[in-house]
């Protein structure tokens, strides 16, 4: 069948693999369209959008790798292991692994051709989805942990432990891996018009694509986002109820965390859902939206160290000190965790407590 007999569409997923062409026959099955082998030439450097996204991804790779590597080094090797450092370390590991895979996407974008074979096609996509789910699950865990510490300070002080935190983190990674398995099952490589592409092969079941897309949207965005909103809403209400002073800093941190989560992931998930019914929308709009949405989502991996570490303390004041001491203060028992304890103790007292009590969380 000639390619003009079917609908020409570019398959896409989180690994920036939106370049494989396939045709839809009259039976609704997607099949690769074989053509004589020709020499493929990349057009990326002649397109403003492609060059821009290439540079953005390269910056995310550099900043994300350095930032998360610093967090891993300090939280994992230079600091006493606490509940907070357990959260930060796991989040940094997840984001660092994601950033470590970005060179594959950068090369793919620049060459407009997948040259790394079937194994790396499956592996890089799998790793990136593991990062997506594990990062979001860890953000939820941190939110719930803070909420519990504020609502039940005595219980939290008696029952929170590094061992239990490690178990929770392990379970989060198990769920993230389980939800990322479709990448290993359905990823494939194929060559068309001299261009090799890493793509999702859903030929065996047309409906599985929609099922996977919806599950990823619900488990990787909607439900976690609702939990985060609920947790921080409870914290804010508790602060107001107890008439706590100096609340500007916690409000700013909470607002930044929620806004970053929403801003980074919403565009990606919106266009993924639109792709499920691509026949109803303009093909170019979906393609461009997916490219931009993926880059914005990737930016969350280097924003996390900033939002969860650097904003944990007075950044301007700590900036004068070394990077190491700043991070140690932000993540250490006398830093973020100490401030959460101060807030919990404050909430457990009467409203006559001294107004100088710390409210940083």
Image (cartoon, rainbow, N blue to C red):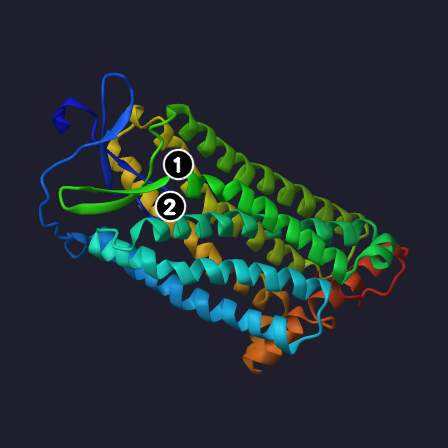
Left or right of 229 in this view: 122? left
User: Total of numbered circles in the picture?
Assistant: 2
Q: For this view, does 215 lie left or right of residue 326?
A: left
Q: Is residue 264 above or below residue 22?
A: below
**Quarter of the rendering occupied by the C terminus:** bottom right
Q: Is residue 203 above or below residue 324?
A: above
Q: In the rendered image, which residue does mark 2 sit on?
A: 293
Residue 104, image x, y percentages:
33, 58
Under circle 2, the secondary element is helix
Q: Residue furthest bottom?
A: 321
At x 22%, y 47%, the residue is 196
Q: Does any portion of residue 299 appear in the rendered image?
A: yes
**Residue 313 or residue 147, whichever sits in front:** 147
Q: Residues within 10 Å of mark 1 (few under 14, many from 20)?
A: many
Q: Residue at x 31, y 28 (%)?
A: 278
Q: Nearer the viewer, residue 20 or 45?
A: 20
> Can you say which quadrant of the picture contains the N terminus?
top left
The answer to whether one can see residue 140 in this image is: no
Do residues under tags 2 and 1 come within 8 Å of each other at their CB atoms? Answer: yes
**Residue lying at 39% horizontally and 62% vertically, measured from the top left:** 60
Circle number at residue 272: 1
Query: Residue shown at 77%/50% (left/top)?
Result: 148
Instruction: Please identify, in this view, whether the residue under mark 2 or under mark 1 is nearer the observer.
Output: 1
Q: Please indicate whether residue 112 sits to the left or right of residue 322 in the image.
A: left
Q: CA distance from mark 2 to mark 1?
A: 9 Å
Q: Under tag 1, what secondary structure?
A: helix
Q: Counting residues from the N terminus, which is met first, the one under dot 2 or under dot 1?
A: 1
Quarter where residue 204 is shown = top left
Which percent across, then down, holds residue 333?
74, 71
């Amino acid at each position: 069948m000639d390619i003009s007999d079917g609908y020409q569409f570019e398959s896409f997923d989180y690994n920036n693999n939106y370049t494989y062409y396939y045709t839809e026959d009259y039976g609704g099955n997607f099949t690769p369209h074989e053509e004589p082998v020709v020499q493929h030439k990349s057009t990326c450097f002649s397109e403003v959008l492609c060059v821009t996204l290439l540079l953005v991804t390269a910056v995310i790779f550099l900043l994300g790798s350095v930032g998360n590597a610093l967090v891993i080094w300090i939280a994992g090797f230079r600091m006493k292991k606490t509940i907070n450092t357990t959260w930060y370390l796991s989040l940094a590991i997840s984001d660092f692994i994601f950033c470590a895979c970005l060179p594959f996407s950068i090369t793919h974008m620049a060459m407009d051709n997948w040259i790394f074979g079937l194994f790396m096609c499956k592996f890089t996509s799998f790793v990136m989805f593991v990062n997506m789910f594990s990062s979001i699950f860890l953000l939820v865990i941190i939110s719930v942990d803070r909420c519990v510490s504020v609502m039940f300070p005595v219980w939290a002080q008696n029952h929170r432990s590094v061992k239990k935190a490690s178990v929770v983190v392990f379970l989060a990674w198990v769920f993230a891996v389980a939800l990322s398995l479709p990448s290993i099952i359905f990823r494939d490589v194929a060559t068309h018009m001299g261009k090799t592409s890493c793509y999702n092969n859903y030929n065996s079941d047309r409906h599985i694509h929609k099922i996977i897309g919806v599950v990823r949207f619900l488990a990787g965005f909607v439900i976690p986002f609702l939990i985060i909103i609920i947790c921080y809403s409870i914290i804010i209400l508790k602060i107001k109820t107890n008439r706590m002073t100096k609340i500007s800093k916690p409000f700013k941190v909470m607002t930044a965390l929620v806004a970053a989560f929403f801003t980074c992931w919403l565009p990606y998930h919106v266009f993924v859902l639109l792709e499920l019914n691509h026949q109803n929308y303009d093909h170019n709009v979906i393609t461009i939206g997916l490219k931009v949405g993926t880059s914005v989502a990737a930016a969350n991996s280097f924003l996390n160290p900033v939002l969860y570490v650097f904003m944990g303390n007075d950044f301007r004041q700590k900036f004068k000190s070394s990077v190491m001491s700043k991070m140690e203060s932000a993540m250490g028992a006398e830093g973020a965790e100490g401030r959460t304890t101060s807030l919990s103790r404050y909430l457990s007292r009467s409203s006559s407590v001294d107004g100088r009590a710390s409210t940083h969380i």
